[in-house]
Image (tube, grey):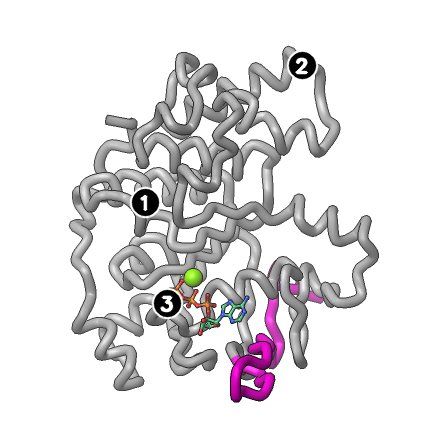
Amino acid sequence: MNAPPLLEARELCVRYLRPAGWLRRPAALEVLRGVNLQLARGEGLAVVGESGSGKSTLVRALLRLVRPHSGQALIAGSDLAILSPAELRAHRRRVSLVFQDPVASLNPAMQVGRIVEEPLLAAGSASADTRRQQVAVQLEAVGLGREYMTRRPHELSGGQAQRVALARALIAQPEVLICDEPVSALDMSLRAQVLALLAQQCRQRSLALLFVTHDLAAARLLCERVLVLRQGMVVEAATTAELFSNPQHAYTRELLGAMLTVDPDAARGSVRSS
Ligand SMILES: Nc1ncnc2c1ncn2[C@@H]1O[C@H](COP(=O)(O)OP(=O)(O)OP(=O)(O)O)[C@@H](O)[C@H]1O
Ligand SMILES: [Mg+2]
């Protein structure tokens, strides 16, 4: 029998409750409507769609940060809704996250070395010396030298901060990396570098990547498959190549028309920090 997908959504529906206000009844806002997705080991899947289409909500549901109204979110075939707290913690260790705003996602009071070390501490693994060594190796892998260990987040550029966030996300050897708009807070010139680094790390580690973006060009660089989300529904699911050569849905064609151009050659270039 084939292994189940690492991450899966089945007919997933999520609602947010809008509280009652002046002259307003409480109302349910339906944010995801019957979403299906499957992410296999080592695969890259992009979720694209305009602001408010439900992309981050989908990520939250796959980590059980929100509960589905109906349908299921599963990890390796297990429904997240019925996992015990211990099983849920184990699930969250298999899945790492990188957020949009790198500086805001790093604890401002901590030095970089400690920030990157944290997932190892949480996993309770290895001696302090070994952990330190692993942190240095991991920082090196994202193009940062040992001298960054003692910096604090406010002493980093946006691109460096996102490298630190990536180092922290990768250090405990997750099987799935979820990136929610990981480069949209960065300058255009830095975007290509960080995307190239992400692509390289995913390839080297055979990581499964769920990549949330507005940017179809970035999706093409990193992912074999794409889901197009609109108003909480998947309007198109295709391989990246098919999507670019033969988009089926009018909304996809609109997104392609509005596409920001990332120069793929520049993106494949240096992965070192500048
Ligand atoms: N906690 C919440 N309570 C109520 N409504 C919410 C909540 N979080 C998000 N929403 C609403 O749900 C919808 C989808 O939000 P979501 O953050 O998933 O969109 P998104 O596709 O990630 O957008 P963006 O590209 O701007 O990040 C939006 O209309 C948003 O206003
Ligand atoms: Mg979002």
Identify the secondary structure beneath mark 2. helix
- Residue at 63% in and 65% down: 66
| x and y, in percent, of residue 133 in the image | 56, 15
Compared with residue 238, is residue 152 higher up or lower down, i.e. above or below?
above
Q: Which residue is mark 1?
A: 195
Please identify, in this view, whether the residue under mark 1 or under mark 2 is nearer the observer.
2
Q: Which of these two is toward me, 45 or 95?
A: 95
| x and y, in percent, of residue 237 in the image | 41, 76
Tell which circle, 3 or 1, labels the residue nearer the N-terminal end.
3
The answer to which image quadrant residue 151 occupies is top left
- Residue at 67% in and 74% down: 72
Compared with residue 147, is residue 174 higher up or lower down, i.e. above or below?
below
Q: Which of these two is toward me, 243 or 234?
A: 234
Crowding at label 3, few (<14), some or many (≥20) Cα neighbours within 10 Å?
A: many
The Cα–Cα distance between marks 3 and 1, rounded to whole angstroms, is 16 Å
The answer to which image quadrant residue 211 occupies is bottom left
Tell which circle, 1 or 2, labels the residue nearer the N-terminal end.
2
Crowding at label 1, few (<14), some or many (≥20) Cα neighbours within 10 Å?
A: many
Residue 48: mark in rendering: 3
Q: Quarter containing ligand 2?
A: bottom left
Q: Three-letter amino acid code at disc 3?
A: Val
Looking at the image, do the residues carrying marks 1 and 2 touch, with CB atoms under 8 Å apart?
A: no
Examine the rendering and report whether any part of residue 15 can be seen.
no
The residue sitting at the front extreme is 22
Q: Which residues are magenta?
A: 1-30
Residue 128: mark in rendering: 2
Compared with residue 235, is residue 106 higher up or lower down, i.e. above or below?
above
